[in-house]
Image: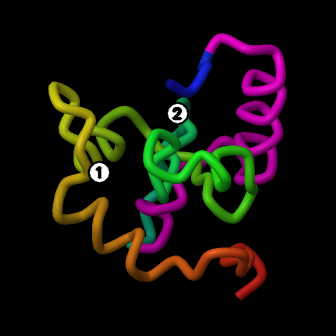
Amino acid sequence: MFDYSSQKWKKKRLHILMLDGYKDRLMARYGRTVPATIVHHIYPAEEYPEYAMCDWNLISVSMATHNQLENRTTGQLTKMGKELMERTVPGVDWRKK
């Protein structure tokens, strides 16, 4: 199980939020400016622990967007979450596209 309370994760989370300007990157694609408070694992940390701390696998989102990406009860990706994962190439920095 991924340790979301570790200092390493807390530092990484802040790094990603700063990198993304504390804005929901998915809503920005639709021209909306929404504050981000959550860092989402595009490839789930439980299934892909090797990608858990990679910048390219992390994206800043709002709580509302996160709820659209993941089923909050089961932790499973939703259709939208799976589509984001399919569009993300492992190891490729999508921020530089």
> Marks 2 and 1, Cα distance to the nearest angstrom?
12 Å
Q: Is 6 positioned to the left or the right of 52 in the image? A: right
What x and y, as percent, mark residue 86?
38, 79
| Residue at point 65%, 55% (across, down) | 51
Q: Residue 41 bears which disc, if any?
A: none
- Quarter of the image for residue 15 reads top right
Q: Quadrant of the C terminus?
A: bottom right
Q: Is residue 26 inside the magenta stretch?
A: yes
What x and y, as percent, mark residue 11?
83, 27
Viewer-nearest residue: 54 or 1: 1
| Residue at point 17%, 64% (across, down) | 79
**Tag 2 residue:** 38
Looking at marks 2 and 1 on the same chain, the residue that comes earlier in the sequence is marked by 2
Mark 2 neighbour density, 10 Å: few (under 14) some (14–19) many (20 or more) = many
Q: Is 3 positioned to the left or the right of 6 in the image? A: left
**Circle 2 SS class:** strand
**Tag 1 residue:** 69
Viewer-nearest residue: 61 or 28: 61
Q: Give the magenta part as a residue range.
A: 5-29
SS majority, magenta? helix
In the image, residue 41 above or below residue 74: below
What x and y, as percent, mark residue 81?
30, 60
